[in-house]
Image (tube, rainbow, N blue to C red):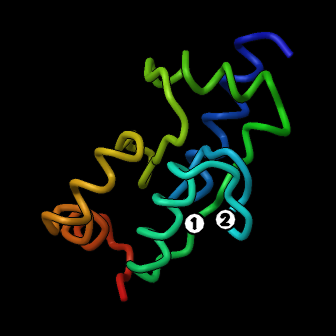
Amino acid sequence: MSQPEIYKTIQSEIESNDIVLFMKGTPKFPQCGFSAAVTHILNTHGVEFKGINVLEDPAIREGIKAFSDWPTIPQLYIKGEFIGGCDITKEMAISGELKALLTEKGIKVA
């Protein structure tokens, strides 16, 4: 798949899901500690999200890094907005910023 095609695929996923996590593994079976940590944070907040396993598609794995201009995975998007990776998500969860953002974006939090 060419880069423009990958970008369209990525953009489509981001636009059609309130919360998207580009991750290694799946939400039920994360395959790296960082992906597991972000999955846990999202589950703790009681929100539904779509996990996209970058290990299944090398084009998406590399494409998402260029798309977001962010070198690492996982990558979290909420309502189309790039939030960041594991460290940023953790910091936001600890500070309460993540819950506030989810609420502000109209996503019900547990």
Marks 1 and 2: in contact by CB < 8 Å? yes
Between 86 and 17, the residue placed more toward the observer is 86
The disc placed on residue 80 is none
Q: Residue at x 55, y 52 (%)?
A: 33
Q: Position of residue 25 (x, y in %)?
A: 73, 52
Q: Position of residue 1 (x, y in %)?
A: 86, 16
Q: Residue at x 70, y 49 (%)?
A: 52
Q: Position of residue 53 (x, y in %)?
A: 74, 46
Query: Image quarter for residue 55?
Result: top right
Between 29 and 105, the residue placed more toward the observer is 29
Query: Image quarter for residue 28?
Result: bottom right
* Mark positioned earlier in the residue sequence (2 or 1): 2
Q: Three-letter amino acid code at disc 2?
A: Pro
How many residues crowd around disc 1 within 10 Å: few (fewer than 14), some, or many (20 or more)?
A: some
The disc placed on residue 49 is 1
The Cα–Cα distance between marks 2 and 1, rounded to whole angstroms, is 9 Å
Q: Three-letter amino acid code at disc 1?
A: Phe
How many residues crowd around disc 2 within 10 Å: few (fewer than 14), some, or many (20 or more)?
A: many
In the displayed orientation, state which residue is furthest to the front: 33
Identify the residue under disc 2.
Answer: 27
Image-based side of 18 in relation to 64, left or right: left
In the displayed orientation, state which residue is furthest to the bottom: 110
Query: Image quarter for residue 51?
Result: bottom right
Between 82 and 86, the residue placed more toward the observer is 86
Q: Position of residue 46 (x, y in %)?
A: 45, 83
Q: Residue at x 35, y 44 (%)?
A: 83
